[in-house]
Image (tube, rainbow, N blue to C red):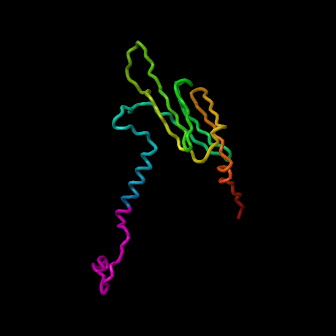
Amino acid sequence: MALPILFRRNRGRNVPVRREQSPFVTLQHDMDRLFEEFWRGFALPSLFEETWGSFTPRVDVEETETEVRVTAELPGLEEKDFEVHLTDDALLLKGERREEHEDQTLGWRERSYGRFERSIPLPCEVDADHASAQFKNGLLTVRLPKTAKARERSKRIQIAAA
C-alpha cells in the first residue's frame, strides 16, 4: 500500500474539514459502556462498608401482559426479617440475615450474613394499591398489576405464515 493513500493531504483546500471522532476513541467508549453494563449486574460493595460476603437475595423479574412478578430467594429468613417497599419505578427489598450462634467450633463459613438492600427496577408502571406479596419456603413472590396505561402500551402482534 502506498504511503500517500494512508496520509492524504488537504491539497488546494483552505477550509477546515471536520473529522469524525477517532475510531479508537469510539472503541474505548464502547468498551467502557460494555464493562459498566457487565458490572451493573453485581452488587459491588462500597469502599467504606464491610459488605464482602454479605447476603444479597437473588431475584427473577417476569413481565406478563397484565402484571410484573418479582420472585426473591430469601432462604433462612422469616417475614419479620425483611421489608418490601414500592416506589414509582422500583421495588425495594431490605432486611437482615442474622448469623446463627452455636457453641460449636466453626471449620469454615460459606454462607453469608448481614444487612441487605436490593432495588429492583420495574419495567413499567404498576398499580401500587393492588400489589400483593406472599412468602413461603424462603421464596418471596410480589405481584404488581400493571396500570391500564401500561397494559395499553404492550400489544401482542400476530405473526402470519409467509
In the image as oriented, which residue stretches furthest toward the bottom?
12
Please tell me which residue lies in front, 34 or 104: 34
Taking 113 as reference, is 157 above or below it? below
Q: Position of residue 139 (x, y in %)?
A: 58, 30
Q: Is residue 113 left or right of residue 89?
A: left
Quadrant into which the C terminus falls: bottom right
- Give the number of marks: 0
In the rendered image, which quarter is residue 101 located in?
A: top left
Please tell me which residue lies in front, 43 or 149: 149
Residue occupying image coordinates x 35% and y 62%: 25
- Which residues make up the magenta segment? 1-26
Helix, strand or loop for the magenta stretch, by majority: loop
Residue occupying image coordinates x 68% and y 52%: 152
Residue occupying image coordinates x 61% and y 34%: 141
Q: Is residue 20 left or right of residue 95?
A: left
Residue occupying image coordinates x 37% and y 66%: 23
Q: Position of residue 120 (x, y in %)?
A: 52, 41
In the image as oriented, which residue stretches furthest toward the top?
103
Q: Is residue 77 magenta?
A: no
Q: Position of residue 38 (x, y in %)?
A: 43, 48
Q: Position of residue 34 (x, y in %)?
A: 42, 53
Quadrant into which the N terminus falls: bottom left
In the rendered image, which quarter is residue 12 located in?
A: bottom left
Taking 81 as reference, is 22 above or below it? below
